[in-house]
Amino acid sequence: MKKVLFIAYYFPPMGMGGVQRAAKFVKYLPEFGWDPVVLTVKDVSYHAGDNTLLEEVEKAVIYRTGSLDPLRLHWKFFGQKASSDRQQSGSSAHSGLLNRINAAFLSKLFIPDSKILWLPHAVLRSGKIIRKIKPDLIFTTSPPHSVHCIGRALKKKYHIPWIMDFRDHLFNEMFQTDMPVWRRRNSEGLYRKISGSADKILTVSAPIAGRLADLAKNKNVDFHVLPNGFDRSDFTGLRQTKKNKKFTIGYCGTFNNYLNPGCLLKALQQVIQRIPDIEKRMQFVFTGQVTDIQMQKNIDETGLSGLFKSTGYVSHKRSIQYMLDADLLFFLLPWNADPGMVTGKIYEYLASGKPILAEVPEGDAADLLKIYGKNTIVAPGNEKILTDEIIRLYQLWEKGRLKTSMSYDKRLNRFDRRNQCEELAGLFDSVCKKTSR
């Protein structure tokens, strides 16, 4: 079996959506002739942990190294406290302060990001791994984008084929609205330098591939789009447990400054004003985590305490059960989201067969929702339309005319993580064949 050195900073037991692409690749690649040997970081202060994801990759060989980056150093100083808090609430008690420090200072200081301080540890350990297992390929996945600096250093020294994987654009304007011009230029220069060494660059969407191709110095770099997806096995044995007595709107994910539910809260407030006793017949179930915003305070101020139910952060498997128990799923992207931003969550929503109410801008996410299923799309910030749509969908449910569960759409098979790994293994084979000539 061929071996791939698989380098990912975000990896189980870390949780949340950004971990799953890497974890599912590692889970399924052995079925298609590739044995992934993983290099990741040791314990860090992170928003959430999910040991069930770690169980899915338990057969993989995983090496963990130290780092000088802020998340690793924070864990070393507050590790026991952070770990205890995370088990209870899904996040570290210190994460809010760390996020503010990172946003205000650290993210602007390091090029391309503060995880560049993992590079010395990662390169040193990778060298030992390479000499031991003699991998056929190196694979790096970002964010953090500094992980590709590790890949380039290894490619340059050991002359092993190397693939870069971008789960997001190099510059996500949604998170980097105040990026200094000098930092952007330096980051662009670094990307041009390292991308020219890659044998192939993967992205999750065509718009991201297009923008990265425009930035690349070497116009002969080979780009390939391999979108995010869902794992059908995550749905095995799960079904809606009961018929809801209340119209249940579900949201699985994160609320924060960027994925801000402000418009949703105002819309729900308007719904209550127009249908005063609706709290007895409707509920909004939030499964996930809140960071950087005072969610409960906003709920109380808008008089929605009786409508909202929060489960807190749960394992990935349990979050899917909450999806299936909903009558309607709410999906959110901000107005300034990259057109190519398509999270793994949207594919899981589609695979659930549930109708979706989405507050999203035009882009790949909106296009997907239009293609698969009869979903409702509202422009971000359009409180009136969002209010009208919630009422319309509620009234359909009340009359028994809202189809709250649909059969699996076989067209979604192209987004099944296992099928995607078969495609990824084929890309690995083609790169190795090409570079061996």
Image (cartoon, rainbow, N blue to C red):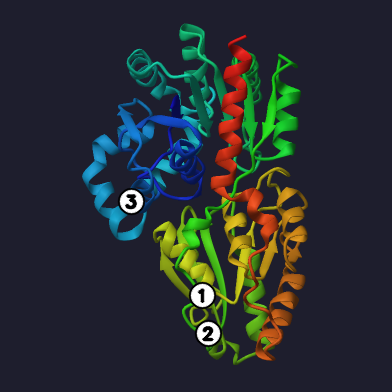
| Point 77% across, 54% down: residue | 367
* Quarter of the figure that contains the C terminus: top right
Mark 3 neighbour class, 10 Å CA radius: few under 14, some 14 to 19, many 20 or more: few
> Which residue is at the front of the view, 268 or 61?
61
Residue at disc 2, secondary structure: loop
Which numbered dot is residue 244? 2
Image spot of residue 351 (x, y percent)? 60, 61
Whether the residues at callouts 2 and 1 have beta carbons within 8 Å, the answer is: yes
Q: Among all residues in the image, which is located at the extreme left?
A: 80
| Point 34% across, 41% down: residue | 45
> How far apart are the alpha carbons under marks 2 and 3?
30 Å
Residue 420 to residue 435: above or below: below
> N-terminal of the two: label 1 or label 3?
3
> How far apart are the alpha carbons under marks 2 and 1?
8 Å
Residue 249 to residue 133: above or below: below
Amino acid carrying mark 3 in the image: Asn
> N-terminal of the two: label 2 or label 3?
3
Residue at disc 3, secondary structure: helix
Horizontal relation, residue 290 to residue 128: left or right: right
Residue 420 to residue 409: above or below: above
Image spot of residue 124 (x, y percent)? 35, 15
| Point 66% across, 24% down: residue | 181
> Which residue is at the front of the view, 98 or 144?
144
Horizontal relation, residue 144 to residue 122: left or right: right
Q: Toward which corner of the image does residue 392 lie, by quadrant?
A: bottom right
Image spot of residue 23 (x, y percent)? 45, 42
> N-terminal of the two: label 2 or label 1?
2
Which numbered dot is residue 325? 1
Residue indicated by mark 3: 51
